[in-house]
C-alpha cells in the first residue's frame, strides 16, 4: 500500500511489494495519527459508555467522561486534535526489516502531519542496517519512501504504536546481552552488558532525551 492515512493504536507499515523488491521511482507517503480518545480509561470504569449500554453512576470528571463517550464514529476519528485534558500520545516506530539501495532509495521519517516538510524531518534512512526506534514528539508522524530509477532491494517493514508522551519507548535488549533498567521516560538511563565471549559495540549506557529519542542506538553484542 502506497500513500495512506493510518491511525492508532498500532499497525504495520511495509514498503510496496514487501518482502519482494520494491519498484523504481516509488513515492509513498504514510501519515500516522494517534487516537487519543480511545485510550481513555478512567479508574473504576469498565470503559463502556451510556450509549453502548454500559456505565452507571457519576464520574469525577465529566469532561473526561464525555470525551470517552463520544459516539463511536467521532471517537475513532483519527483527525481529532489532541485533547488537552488527556495525556498526549505520541507515535513509536520500530523496524523489523530494512534494506534499501544505499544513498539512492530513502525513507524519511518526520514529526507531525506535513509530509516532506524539511523542518520536521527526524531521520533520513537508507542502506541495510535496521534503524533504532523512532518516537515522534507529537501525535502524528509522517513517512516518505522515495526510490530512484534503477536498483531495487527488499524494502522495509515497521510497526507503529501509540505511547504516552514523555517516553522514548522500549529499545529492546541486544542479542547475547543484558540490560539494566526498565524505565523509558525522559531522563531514564539504561545500561547494557554482553554475555561472556561477546563484546559490546556502541554505547554502554543510553538516556531518554526530551525529544523522545534515546541518546544513542541500542548497542550490539558481537563475538570477540
Ligand atoms: Ca534504487
Image: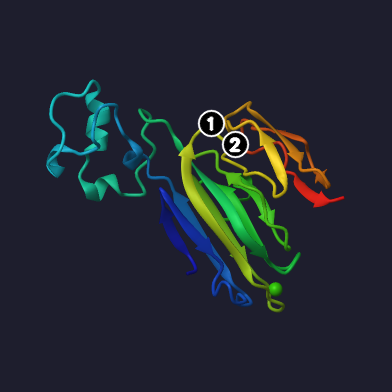
Residue at the spot 59% in from the left edge and 32% down from the top edge: 182
Between 197 and 217, the residue placed more toward the observer is: 197
The residues tagged by marks 1 and 2 sit, at their Cα atoms, a distance apart of: 7 Å
Label 1 CB less than 8 angstroms from ligand 1: no
| Picture quadrant of ligand 1 | bottom right
Residue at the spot 69% in from the left edge and 67% down from the top edge: 100
Q: Secondary structure at mark 1?
A: loop
Q: How many marks?
A: 2
Residue at the spot 24% in from the left edge and 50% down from the top edge: 73
Between 135 and 123, the residue placed more toward the observer is: 135
Query: With respect to residue 66, does 5 lie above or below?
Result: below
Farthest top residue in view? 60
Q: Which quadrant of the view contains residue 212?
A: top right
CB within 8 Å, label 1 to label 2: yes
Residue on which disc 2 sits: 212
Residue at the spot 63% in from the left edge and 50% down from the top edge: 118
Tag 2: Cα neighbours inside 10 Å, few (<14), some, or many (≥20)? many
Residue on which disc 1 sits: 166
Amino acid at each position: 500500500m502506497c500513500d495512506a492515512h493510518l491511525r492508532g493504536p498500532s499497525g504495520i507499515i511495509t514498503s510496496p511489494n514487501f518482502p519482494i523488491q520494491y519498484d523504481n521511482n516509488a513515492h509513498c507517503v504514510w501519515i500516522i495519527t494517534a487516537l487519543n480518545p480511545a485510550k481513555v480509561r478512567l479508574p473504576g470504569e469498565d470503559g463502556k459508555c451510556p450509549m453502548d449500554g454500559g456505565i452507571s453512576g457519576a464520574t469525577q470528571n465529566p469532561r473526561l467522561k464525555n470525551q470517552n463517550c463520544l459516539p463511536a464514529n467521532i471517537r475513532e476519528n483519527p483527525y481529532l486534535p489532541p485533547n488537552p485534558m488527556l495525556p498526549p500520545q505520541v507515535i513509536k516506530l520500530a523496524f523489523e526489516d530494512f534494506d534499501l539501495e544505499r544513498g539512492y532509495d530513502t525513507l524519511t521519517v518526520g514529526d507531525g502531519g506535513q509530509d516532506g516538510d524539511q523542518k520536521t524531518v527526524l531521520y533520513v534512512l537508507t542502506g541495510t542496517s535496521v534503524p533504532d526506534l523512532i518516537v515522534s514528539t507529537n501525535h502524528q508522524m509522517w513517512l516518505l519512501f522515495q526510490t530512484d530509477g534503477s536498483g531495487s532491494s527488499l524494502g522495509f517493514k515497521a510497526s507503529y504504536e501509540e505511547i504516552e508522551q514523555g517516553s522514548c519507548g522500549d529499545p529492546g535488549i541486544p542479542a547475547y546481552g543484558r540490560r539494566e533498567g526498565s524505565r523509558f521516560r525522559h531522563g531514564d538511563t539504561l545500561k547494557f552488558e554482553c554475555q561472556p565471549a561477546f563484546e559490546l559495540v556502541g554505547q554502554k549506557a543510553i538516556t531518554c532525551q526530551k525529544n523522545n529519542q534515546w541518546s544513542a542506538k541500542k548497542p550490539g553484542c558481537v563475538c570477540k
